[in-house]
Amino acid sequence: MKFADLGLSDELLQSVLSAGYDTPTPIQAQAIPSVLMMKDIIGIAQTGTGKTASFVLPMIDILAHGRRRALMPRSLILEPTRELAAQVAENFEKYGKNHDLKMALLIGGVQMGDQVKALKDGVDVLIATPGRLMDLFERGKILLTGCDLLVIDEADRMLDMGFIPDIETICAKLPANRQTLLFSATMPPPIKKLADKFLSNPKYIEVSRPASSNLNIVQHKVAVTSRSKKDVLKTLLRTDNVSTAMIFCNRKTTVRELAKSLSQSGFSAGEIHGDMDQSSRIAELDRFKAGTINILVCSDVAARGLDIKGVSHVFNYDTPWHPDDYVHRIGRTGRAGATGRAFTFVAPEDAEAIDNVEKLTGGKIPVYDLDSGAKQESAKGERAPRAEKPAREARPAREARTPREERAPREERAPREERAPREERPARAERPAREARPPREERAPRAERVAKPEVVASESEAPVAAAPRRAAVPKQAPKPKAKAGMADEAEWNGPVPDFLRFST
């Protein structure tokens, strides 16, 4: 089947052919004729199947007839993120170049003045995120009573982001007699309830089983620890023939830290997350698409719907908390018939999360063995074997050393018996036993023993006054000779001569 068989106008076919397409994808082949017949549609399709063109192309032909009015858009497309809204706007510009249609893009992070001015001039297509649309509606800057065609894109992502109440409010403001198209990769109960409430006898189109993953993507899970994640990632980036890669993290802080670490390691890496303003996010996406950088670290804000050609690898640096996010993350590769590879890092604490992913996809993800494959062989070829390291070869073998028994025996070294035994040392042997000393009360008081010569020899006070300082000796060094002459101490009436002093 060709696009010419779907009932599109000649002007639109020229735009499609000039863009390089002539054969529709399955979702396009089934959805476009039904949209042209003004039917409500529920489209279930995995990401990367051409879902955006399946509603953009027929909308261009439908809106080619009619006129626009100020503040009253003729059609409305709701997208969960700014990036998806901008991408749909690019599709309208590409395929609608041969039609006189005006479009307005209502997203956060940009000035509101230009958006209000475009609405006042009148638009045929209004592409918006729910938050900015509700803001303008509450300010009275937009009227939804003239909107005859509503598209709710990535409905399951809307659910995850908490936009369902806003969508219900918006749908209540639209005309009851309208055409509604709802597209989603999965169909959880809240989305089914939303479809039952706001769609009228819809045609159900499913081109793949819900939550199934693209068969063109080779999937692996890699057992890691929290500390080894960065090293394993860098090894795979260097050895797995990565041309362009998207790396997904669960937290914005992880995105920033990982992008910085990769840049410091020599990789051309950028980042995109919810804390960045819109102009910075667009700039990073443009750098990635242009090839200025080949690695984009991002949070789930970039997981869904972004059509970036040539992404060879997807890395789930963190196992996604919600299993639906796994399908959308890996869907950034293997698009439009190309093949791709997806690696999911599974730490011990991710056991429950990866089980939920495998339950949703209906099969076990093969384990990637880091110890086998080409990357290990290339790494081995670059490193010297452990046994050939010079540091180890330079050491003498243990058996080559002199045996212990051949060394000089310990007893031949400086025998202890040649040293003076402890009991024969004169300094300690000549000390009188403590009990042989006279009792403390029998000794002369310290003051009397030192000052006694001063009283006897009153005519030589100067020498006697200096005697106590010179005669002071430690208690533990008694003077045996002085003790021997203790009886004659009373007959001596002069200072003690130096040769009679005993010092240890």
Image: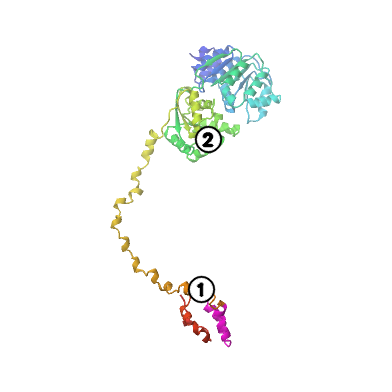
In the displayed structure, would residue 197 be above or below residue 447?
A: above
The residue to which callout 1 is attached is 475
Judge the density around disc 1: few (<14), some (14-19), many (≥20) Cα neighbours within 10 Å.
Answer: few
Residue 404: x %, y % from top left:
30, 55
Direction from residue 390 to residue 267 in the image, left or right: right
Tag 1 near tag 2, CB within 8 Å: no
| Above/below status of 361 relative to 487 | above
Report the disc number at residue 355.
Answer: none
Say which amino acid is labelled 1: Lys
Which element type, helix, strand or loop, lies under badge 2?
strand
Please tell me which residue is depicted at 55% across the width and 83% down the height of the picture.
Answer: 453
Residue 347 visible in rendering: no
- Check disc 2 and report the residue beneath it: 270
x and y, in percent, of residue 322 in the image: 54, 28
**Type of amino acid at the residue the image marks with label 2:** Gly
Question: Does the magenta run of residues contain 457?
Answer: yes
Residue 53 is at least partly visible in this image = yes
Q: Nearer the viewer, residue 163 or 237?
A: 163
Residue 2 or residue 422, whichever sits in front: 422
Residue range corresponding to the magenta coloring: 447-473
Which secondary structure dominates the residues rendered in magenta? Answer: helix
- Which callout, 1 or 2, points at the residue further toward the start of the chain? 2
Separation of residues labelled 1 and 2 (CA atoms):
82 Å
Res 373 quadrant in image? top left
Rendered image quadrant of residue 181: top right
Residue plotted at (66% across, 28% down): 114
Secondary structure, mark 1, is loop
Q: Residue furthest left?
A: 406
The question of residue 360 being in magenta is answered with no
Q: Nearer the viewer, mark 1 or mark 2?
A: 1
Which x, y percent locates residue 254?
54, 36
